[in-house]
Amino acid sequence: MSETNYYKILGIGKNASVAEVKKAYRKMAMKYHPDQTKGDKSAEEKFKSISEAYAVLSDKEKRRQYDTFGSTGFHQRYSQEDIFRGFDLGDILKEFGFGGRRRSKGMGNGIRFSFGPESPFGPHQRRPQTPVKGADLVYELPLTLQEVATGTRKIVNFQHGGRSENLTVKIPKGMITGKKLRLAGKGDSSSYGGPPGDLFIQSKVVARPPFSANGYDLTMKREIKLSEAILGTTLSIPTLEKKEINLTIPPGTKHKTKMRLPGMGLPHMKAKGTGDLYILIHINIPEQLTAQQKKIIKQLAKTGL
């Protein structure tokens, strides 16, 4: 789940008053409302995002929760249905000059956007004659590189249907950023007699120095001295298993050389194999030299070095 900046979406500052929030929404709604854009999908998505931003920032408690916990924490506590529950944009849009068609829950003027049949942004339609599954939820779960490498168990707290629930979730090895686990029936309940939706646990890897992650591969930057680049050296490289391996740096290694250690990255989630570890070599060129060092460098320069 990507970070959602409701203030940026409406083009206002964090200290904006309720009146300023409403003014900003009115201005953007006049521009992006579907009655104005006539089938423009990008404008429809924009209208959806500004309406969600207004639903949160115009509500004192939701705005307090958003400001306190940030985007990720807020969306772990509020589903799309929660955001629009008890909030009728129809009256607001009618006030802005839009109206005339039948209104639906959450959105005025008969317009609903597709997040699923149970979402306040689902396509506007009559009540289904057959049972309809509830809306799915997505929970973004931060994981360390060590947790991705070994697997772990996490307690997940989330809100759905207006209530809070704790779940203990087994996280398999290799659950890199973007990978999902499906927990059947843990989403929102259905208003139409169908089964509840599903909860998807989506991972977000939080890498800390000295490692950075790109998919299943890891990268580490290591500095060596100029003399070590010329003559060669041996580096001690830490691994995620908290071990040390020796890496030979050959004589004449160039700046930003990338050396590959196969199979030293993160394990694949559903298949055999492991990513690689890349060591990016940076040569440290000293900004200042002692008199003796300058003398030696000058002597080397005379030899053609």
Image: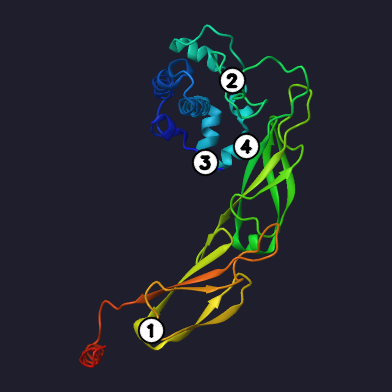
Residue at 74%, 45% (x, y): give it: 167
Q: Are marks 1 and 2 in contact (CB under 8 Å)?
A: no
* Chain-order first, disc 1 or disc 2: 2
- Residue type marked 2: Gly
Q: Is disc 1 surrounded by few (<14), some (14 to 19) or many (20+) residues within 10 Å?
A: few
Task: Give percent across and percent down for residue 153.
Answer: 72, 55
The numbered mark, 1 or 4, whose residue comes first in the sequence reads 4
Q: Element at badge 1?
A: loop
User: On the image, which quarter does residue 289 sit in?
Assistant: bottom left
Label total for image = 4
Quadrant of residue 129 within the rendered picture: top right
- Label 1 – label 4 distance at C-alpha: 56 Å
Is the residue marked by circle 2 packed among few (<14), some (14-19), or many (20+) residues within 10 Å? many
Reading the image, the residue beneath label 1 is: 252
Specify the label residue 77 is tagged with.
Answer: 4
Q: Is residue 139 above or below residue 117?
A: below
Circle 4 sits in a helix, a strand or a loop, which is it?
Answer: helix
Describe the element under mark 3 as helix, strand or loop. Answer: helix
**Viewer-nearest of discs 1 and 2:** 1
- Residue kind at label 3, given as amino acid type: Gly
Near mark 4 (Cα within 10 A), the count class, few <14, some 14-19 or many ≥20, is many
Q: Nearer the viewer, mark 2 or mark 4?
A: 2
Pointer 3: what residue?
A: 70
Image position of 103 (left or right of 281): right
Tell me which label, 2 or 3, sits earlier in the chain: 3
